[in-house]
């Protein structure tokens, strides 16, 4: 099948760029990765050499290029707003890593700008398009747990220790709810739809003194901005009530959980940060059983070479799905600006509710359809690569 590829550039060549650059250049037929860019030229040169990308461009060159249609923004959260705005103003479609921006008003402004210009603006997390969450969505649509009544979500980490390794975590957007909780919110929204009301309690991060041996000795103690612990309750438009716990002030032994309760059963969704976390279904008199995936993109590397960043799975699937939307002229790309804005507004609502003691009612809404089922990433028991990209077309 001949594909009119979408010519794409990546901005930001840090840790997460490895998986994006590999997947965008090798996994998805719809993408033609033309160039990469970083404010630090050596960072771009290193990734160009590692991944065999022939062209390095500056931000200005990308903005003025007539060739490039889509920009993938992989800078740290505090740089997102400027990069996205510049590229939208230059007439480029943009897909950005999470958080959208670190300020809800700026995110709203970017959504308006994309609307005015008639451009696509996509937002991570795209783990929600993986086999795990898409199969969970299918299970709910098929009514296997009846009507959803409630849910329970938990993720914990030592975010301060982690901020010694991933330095951007010291800044806005680095607190656990925004850096990691966003995967849980994204998955909840994908499964249950928009949130009607938010109540929460919150606590800031501790003040941290570096503990790792290789920490920079000049580092003064720091505190991650915002609430690093949130205990919240969400009321969804469909009536489901979900309790959420994000704790970044504890240890790194993750006790992640996402359980959805319904009138006829219980669904354990596993780890929303992964593309292929196992799903477990419990029904009365039937015990607990595994659910086979109904969709592809389970996070396994089906390309030839193994790499140190394989654990990041199928990231870039949201870019590819948006690229198919662009080519097919459909306006409903899944990881849409409306989805990204609603994810951020739910987190913002938690922070605001913790501060004011009042219930927050999100203004934004979104719709996300499930991907077509039955298209898998592998064939013949995993011996060959399948054509899961078909599920991203419509
Ligand atoms: N590291 C992870 O495990 C991970 C996982 C999922 C998502 N993310 C998200 O991906 C994004 C990047 O994370 P990372 O870990 O790769 O960060 P990083 O700090 O390793 O890399 C960011 C890169 O962006 C570059 N940059 C900053 N401003 C720029 C600008 N104006 N123009 C061009 N380049 C610029 C920096 O020089 C740096 O090389 C963040 O939004 C983060 O939330 C990270």
Image: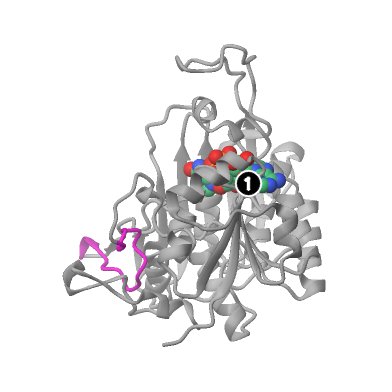
**Pointer 1 residue Cβ closer than 8 Å to ligand 1:** yes
Tell me which residue sits at (46%, 63%) in the image.
Answer: 25
Decide if residue 360 is in sight here.
Answer: no
In which image quadrant can residue 134 be found? Answer: bottom left
Tell me which residue sits at (64%, 37%) in the image.
Answer: 201
Residue 83 sits above or below residue 317 on the image: above
Percent of width and height locating residue 385: 27, 71
Residue 22 sits above or below residue 296 on the image: above
Tell me which residue sits at (59%, 74%) in the image.
Answer: 333
Task: Find disc 1 in the rendering and name its residue.
Answer: 38
Q: Quadrant of the N terminus?
A: bottom left
Local crowd at mark 1 within 10 Å, few (<14), some, or many (≥20)? many
Image-based side of 111 in relation to 379, left or right: right
- Residue 324: say if magenta: no
Residue range corresponding to the magenta coloring: 286-303
- Comparing 282 with 21, the one in front is 21
Which residue is at the far bottom?
1
Quadrant of the picture in which ligand 1 is shown: top right
Residue 386 sits above or below residue 348 on the image: below
């Amino acid at each position: 099948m001949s594909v009119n590829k979408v010519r794409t550039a990546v901005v930001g060549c840090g840790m997460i760029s490895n998986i994006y650059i590999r997947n965008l250049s090798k996994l998805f037929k719809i993408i033609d990765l033309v160039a990469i860019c970083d404010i630090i030229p050596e960072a771009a040169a290193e990734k160009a050499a590692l991944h065999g990308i022939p062209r390095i461009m500056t931000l200005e060159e990308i903005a003025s290029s007539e060739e490039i249609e889509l920009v993938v923004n992989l800078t740290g959260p505090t740089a997102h707003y400027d990069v996205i705005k510049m590229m939208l103003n230059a007439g480029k479609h943009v897909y950005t890593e999470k958080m959208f921006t670190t300020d809800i008003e700026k995110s709203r402004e970017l959504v308006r700008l994309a609307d005015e210009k008639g451009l696509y603006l996509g937002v991570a997390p795209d783990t929600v398009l993986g086999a795990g969450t898409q199969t969970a969505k299918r299970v709910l649509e098929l009514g296997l747990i009846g009507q959803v009544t409630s849910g329970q979500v938990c993720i914990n980490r030592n975010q301060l220790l982690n901020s010694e390794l991933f330095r951007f975590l010291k800044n806005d957007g680095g607190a656990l709810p925004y850096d990691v909780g966003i995967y849980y919110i994204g998955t909840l929204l994908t499964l249950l739809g928009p949130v009607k009301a938010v109540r929460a309690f919150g606590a800031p991060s501790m003040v941290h003194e570096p503990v790792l041996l290789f920490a920079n000795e000049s580092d003064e103690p720091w505190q991650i901005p915002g609430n690093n612990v949130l205990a919240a309750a969400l009321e969804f438009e469909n009536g489901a009530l979900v309790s959420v716990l994000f704790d970044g002030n504890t240890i790194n032994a993750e006790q992640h959980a996402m359980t959805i309760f319904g009138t006829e059963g219980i669904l354990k969704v596993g780890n929303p940060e992964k593309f292929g976390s196992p799903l477990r279904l419990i029904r009365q008199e039937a015990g607990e059983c595994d659910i086979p995936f109904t969709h592809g993109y389970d996070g396994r590397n089906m390309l030839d070479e193994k790499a140190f960043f394989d654990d990041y799975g199928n990231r870039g699937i949201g870019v590819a799905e948006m690229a198919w939307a662009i080519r097919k002229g459909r306006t409903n790309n899944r990881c849409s600006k409306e989805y990204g804005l609603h994810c951020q507004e739910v987190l913002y609502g938690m922070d605001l509710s913790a501060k004011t003691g009042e219930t927050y009612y999100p203004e934004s809404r979104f719709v996300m359809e499930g991907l077509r089922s039955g298209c898998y990433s592998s064939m013949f028991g995993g011996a060959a690569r399948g054509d899961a990209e078909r599920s991203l077309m419509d």
